[in-house]
Amino acid sequence: MSERSGVPGQGLVKGLAVTLKTMTSRSTTQQYPDVAPELPPRSRGVIALLEENCTVCMLCARECPDWCIYIDSHKEEVAVPGAARPRQRNVLDKFDIDFSLCMYCGICVEVCPFDALYWSPEFEYAEHDIKDLLHDKDHLGEWMATVPPPPAHDPHGEPSKEETTAARKAAAPARPAAERPEPGPAAGGGATP
């Protein structure tokens, strides 16, 4: 016969102690529908599209692990004054994100080289029908109004590359034309004297 350790009813007393402790502490329940939650500054809610910046490079669609971004475009010719021939540019026809498939990883926002995709903290876009979670470019563009401004630069942080380059150019004294080195002969076949 095995011996029991402890006093009979010890577990009951521990349970009642936890109950009394929680009864006397203040509740931290948030009344969500009535009171909006305070979200952290970099919350991920819904992805917003700034259509003017999209060049249809397709990086976001190629890098998406869920394949939930659908893009379609066509080419238009743009006449450039002084150019020998007209140039072509991509025009965005369709940009859809299926939020029923999206896992909110943020890869599309990170890889966009032209800042066309942004995170919006809005999270209240539930639908009764799953087909309505496919947002087109107009619906994605409406979310841009909810995108917060970027945070201010930390004055004690490292300066950006642009600021460093501008400061270096401003600090370098301009050399007169007489002191500049003469260009040498062309490489690969120029005769030497």
Image: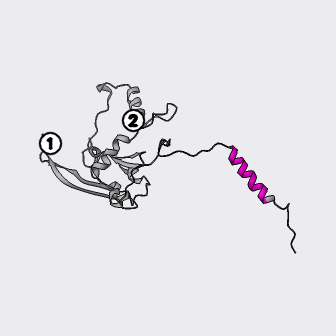
Percent of width and height locating residue 167: 41, 29
Number of labelled discs?
A: 2
Residue 95: name its quadrant: bottom left
- 4 in relation to 49, above or below: below
**Badge 2: residue crowd in 10 Å (few <14, some 14–19, many ≥20):** few
Percent of width and height locating residue 192: 27, 43
Q: Dot 2 corresponds to which residue? A: 162
Q: Which numbered tag is attached to residue 67?
A: none
Q: Which numbered tag is attached to residue 80?
A: 1
What amino acid is found at the position of numbered circle 2 in the picture? Glu
Range of magenta residues:
11-33
Percent of width and height locating residue 3: 87, 69
**Badge 1: residue crowd in 10 Å (few <14, some 14–19, many ≥20):** few
- 166 in relation to 192, above or below: above
Q: Is residue 20 magenta?
A: yes
Q: Is residue 14 magenta?
A: yes
